[in-house]
Image: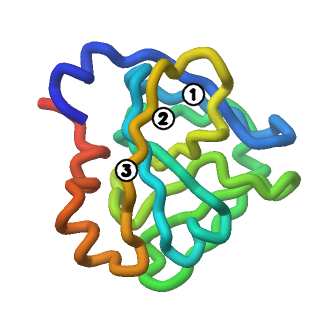
Amino acid sequence: MDSNQNSDLITHKGGCHCKRVRWEVKAPNSLIAWKCNCSTCIMRGNTHFIVPSKHFNLISGESNITTYTYGTHTAKHTFCNVCGITSFYTPRSNPDGVAVTLNCLDHGTVTHVEIRSFDGVNWDDSYSQTGISACSKLDS
């Protein structure tokens, strides 16, 4: 997130399909989201944006969250144990941040989305070339 976006943060709300898991996230109204082709994102059709963990607040549903990990176990793929929706998770690329599933946002607060590609099949190369790791950093 670049420094002039930090002053333009608004609160977005969202959650899972059954509404047991609800959260709010501070982010700009114009988002940069990532479409990934790793083995789990491609199966889920996941497109997400990443924020510093301090900008994410779980409002309800902590007892309904189940976590799945694989590979390096750095990513924590959280999902609702009732409806199965991954509305947010801790990504491998940004273990200090939260990846929010774009389609799990409540309508009305996003004005623009730029979709960027992350080649999760070739994770190391994509990580070093995309600058994705900066998405979870707080501005000084």
In the rendered image, which residue does mark 3 sit on? 116
When the figure is inspected, residue 50 is found, relative to residue 139, above or below; the finding is below
Q: Dot 2: what SS?
A: strand
Residue at left 57%, top 66%? 41
Closer to the eye: label 2 or 3: 3
Circle 2 Cα neighbour tier, 10 Å, few/some/many (<14 / 14–19 / ≥20): many
**Residue at point 56%, 78% (across, down):** 39
For residue 59, side relative to residue 12 (left or right)? right
Q: Residues within 10 Å of mark 3 (few under 14, many from 20)?
A: some
Relative horizontal placement of residue 81, taking residue 69 as reference (left or right): right
Residue 89, located in which quarter of the rendered image?
Answer: bottom right
Q: Earlier in the sequence, mark 1 or mark 3?
A: 1
User: Mark 2 and 1 residues: CB-CB less than 8 Å, in contact?
Assistant: yes
Counting residues from the N terminus, which is met first, the one under dot 2 or under dot 3? 2
Identify the residue position indicated by label 1 in the image.
Answer: 24
Q: Earlier in the sequence, mark 2 or mark 1?
A: 1
Q: Amino acid at mark 1?
A: Glu
Q: How many marks?
A: 3
Q: Which mark is residue 56?
A: 2
- Provide the secondary structure element on which disc 1 rests: strand
Disc 2 and disc 1: Cα gap in Å? 6 Å
Disc 1: CA contacts within 10 A as few (<14), some (14-19) or many (>=20): some
Near-viewer residue (96 or 107): 107
Mark 1 vs mark 3, foreground winner is 3
User: How far is the residue under mark 2 from the one under mark 3?
Assistant: 22 Å
Residue toward you, 67 or 103: 103
At label 3, which amino acid type do we have?
Arg
Q: Could you tell me residue 58's position as x and y percent? A: 60, 36
For badge 2, the amino acid type reads Phe
